[in-house]
Image (cartoon, rainbow, N blue to C red):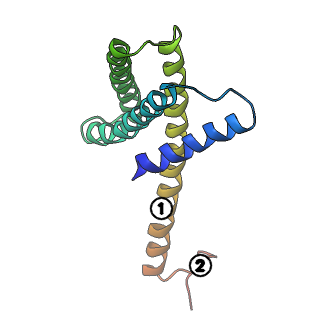
Amino acid sequence: MTICVLFTIITRFDIIAILLGLWPPKEDLGPYVHLLGRFVLISILVGGLQIFDILASRIKSKLVIYAVTFFLTWGILLVYLWIQGLFTELHPDAYIDISISYAFMYGLLGIVVFVFGRTKKAAKNKKITDANAETKGLNIETGHRQP
């Protein structure tokens, strides 16, 4: 479901940019190949989350996991692009363009995951603190014992 939602949102941004005249509409089979490429890009990005979860159970450093996942999924993406190049003509800057797009999306996803993780962790710590205060008979706001 995540792949479908991301694919739809990003495709809508592309359509809005075309309607605003920021870049010209695509012609011939190009749009379909482009849409399939976008779907693969997003699928690899979301698949990276699964790889991240698998590595998280084995490696402690989240930064190392993030970097390993990035390079592994980026490699998969470049192999996909190479295979696509066997069947269709690629733009001369295809590898650079896909690398920039992927790095941007991966960085954006990393920021979202980091912020969500921090927020979730802060909420969990607050619940634990509140539960500890209640078991000790402390007022949560003041920290003093309740009468």
Q: Residue at the far bottom: name it.
A: 147
Instruction: Tell me: 29 left or right of 140.
Output: left
Using the rendered view, name the quadrant where residue 72 is placed.
top left
Instruction: Decide if residue 79 is in sight here.
Output: yes
What amino acid type should be assigned to the residue bearing mark 1?
Asn
| The disc label shown at residue 20, or none | none
Residue at screen point 34% across, 22% down: 80
- Which is nearer the N-term, disc 2 or disc 1? 1
Which residue is depicted at the point 57% across and 26% down?
27
The location of residue 14, given as percent across then percent down, is: 61, 36
Q: Position of residue 97 (x, y in %)?
A: 54, 18
Q: Residue at x 41, y 46 (%)?
A: 3
Give the quadrant of residue 74.
top left
For the residue marked with disc 2, what is the amino acid?
His
Q: Would residue 113 be visible to someone looking at this image?
A: no
- Compared to 120, does 79 lie above or below? above
Pick the residue in front: 3 or 17: 17
State the residue position of label 2. Answer: 144
Which of the two discs, 2 and 1, sits closer to the camera? 1
Give the side of residue 37 with respect to residue 116, left or right.
left
| Callout 2 touching callout 1 (CB < 8 Å) | no
Spatial CA distance of label 2 from label 1 is 19 Å
Q: Where residue 133 appears, x then y in whole percent?
A: 49, 75
* Extreme-top residue of the structure: 92
Residue situated in front as seen by the camera: 110 or 139: 110
Tell me the residue that label 1 is attached to.
Answer: 125
Identify whether 26 is placed above or below 15. Answer: above
Mark 2 Cα shell of 10 Å, populated few (<14), some (14-19), many (≥20): few
